[in-house]
Image: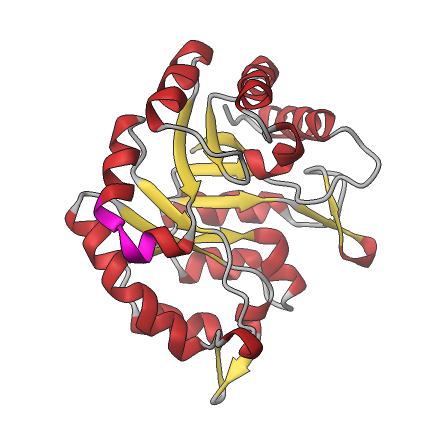
Amino acid sequence: MEIGAQLYTVREHCKTLEDFAVTLRRVADIGYKTVQVSGACPFEPEWLKAQLEQNGLKCVITHTDGARICTEPEKVAAEHDVFDCKYIGLGSYGFNPDRGESLEHLLATYREPAERLKACGKYFMYHNHAKEFNRQDGKLILDHICETIPADVMGITLDTYWVQVGGADPAQWLEKLAGRIPCIHLKDCAFGQQMAVLGEGNMNFDRIFEKAETAGTEYMLVEQDRCYDQDPFDCLTRSYQYLRAHGFE
């Protein structure tokens, strides 16, 4: 398994192309070789390809606007071809009834685009938060999703923190979703559900690493949505050092 940085962590430093370029260099200087592009300013795929090559980085997954995934999946896939990225992710789904967001809407909306991405050689990835561990009709929402859209059409970017906040066991879910979790998010959970640098919270990462390995995970991406009063680049650095100390590169 390779380790990488989820750039949503440093999204405030990716609001312009100039800042985004500096951020990619800083992430590479920490030692990361792979990234997930998420929360950044608009960019042309050729620009990203050049910046990645310049910094010795590879973008292995993105979070892409859901409306674009639904309305122009072939174009989205072609753009990802430019910078050689297989995994195309949906960053979140709100399950907000005031906006017509329901489990039924999610399943009806994204199945066909996911199949069209597959036809283009891509793999649609759904990123969970805590709401997927609510129950509907006696079953977890995440179970409904995974049972309705098959593993060869949609993967899950399992987020260890949000699984735990949802009241579930991240390692158990890594085992359960074996074969459909090529990319996962690593973030630690400290007292009071505070997001933390890896190793500075209370997650059982030894077990998480073991289950991710056997489940076929390719990329473990460090993400810290909130760094509170800490420098997000410093947070990424400390998480990187933690992973390197556990033998990952």
Q: Which residues are magenta?
A: 69-74
Query: Which secondary structure type mostly characterizes the magenta part of the structure?
Result: helix
In the figure, residue 198 lies in which quadrant? top right
In the figure, residue 222 lies in which quadrant? top right
Is 71 in the magenta? yes
Q: Who is closer to the viewer here, 225 or 40?
A: 40
Vertical arrangement, residue 198 with respect to residue 72, above or below = above
Q: Residue 200 at what x, y percent from top left?
A: 76, 39
Q: Who is closer to the viewer here, 6 or 105?
A: 105
Vertical arrangement, residue 142 with respect to residue 155, above or below = below
Is 202 in the magenta? no
Q: Along the horizontal axis of the image, is 182 left or right of 165? A: left
Q: Residue 173 at what x, y percent from top left?
A: 49, 61
Q: Residue at x 56, y 18 (%)?
A: 18
Vertical arrangement, residue 150 with respect to residue 193, above or below = below
Q: Residue 114 at what x, y percent from top left?
A: 27, 57
Viewport quadrant of the N terminus: top left
